[in-house]
Image (cartoon, rainbow, N blue to C red):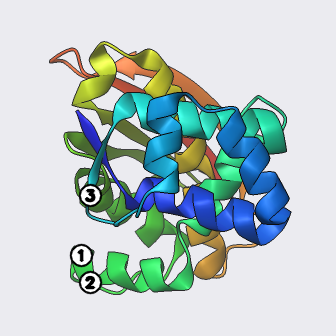
Amino acid sequence: MHVKGTNLKVIKEVILEKYGREGWEKFLNLLSDDARKAMEGLLLPSSLYSKEIYTEVNKVADFLFGNGKGSFIRELGRVSSSENVFKLYSDLIGKKIETPVDVIKYVPAAVMPKIFNGGRGETIRIGGNSGVFRVGTEFSRDDREVLWVIAQRGIGWALNLLEQVGAKNSRFVKLSWGEWKDGVPYAEIEVAWD
């Protein structure tokens, strides 16, 4: 029921880069004591943090710097799928990711378990210039709010990866919810591109 530190580190980096120390201090002042302590500490990529802290820091950042409906969290997803991360994904999958179809077909299943303890991902459909994939975590059974945050990050993450393989006009189409047969909830994300 923990999230890797890399998911928190990107929040700190983006806030400091875009909003400076003043923005960072405003952000810290809105956090609970536990979340503030985590964010002020040394955020090691492989360290584990609670899903409560993960959810809180994403939602507070979106409230302060986004529209409160996921826009800033999606931006965090975009940043977290940088070119270096893209290369790492290719290594994890064991093949080059060269097309938008490759992104949708291979990345969710390979990456979700590496990012989240108990994470799952699967491809549902790829057709023409669109695709649908599911992401979820075991620990979102008792906390659907964390799944909303994961979905928002996943949207930004997918759009940036699609652009890195040359997709034009990549866009979010639809978000829906469901459960796998064993009761683990998922977010189903549809994206499209030209």
Q: Which residue is mark 3?
A: 47
- Marks 2 and 3 in Cβ contact (< 8 Å): no
Q: CA distance from mark 1 to mark 3?
A: 20 Å
Q: Quadrant of residue 82?
A: bottom right
Q: Is residue 163 above or below residue 2?
A: below
Q: What residue is rendered at 49% in x and 62% in y? A: 9
Instruction: Tell us which disc is closer to us: 1 or 3.
Output: 3
Q: Is residue 142 above or below residue 18?
A: above
Instruction: Please state which of residues 66 and 105 is positioned toward the viewer in this rendering.
Output: 66
Q: Amino acid at mark 3?
A: Ser
* Mark seen at residue 66: none
Q: Which residue is mark 2?
A: 91
Q: Is residue 74 left or right of residue 190?
A: right
Q: Is residue 8 above or below residue 49?
A: below
Q: Quadrant of residue 71?
A: top right
Q: Which residue is mark 1?
A: 92
Could one spot residue 150 in this view of the protein?
no
Q: Position of residue 57 (x, y in %)?
A: 57, 39
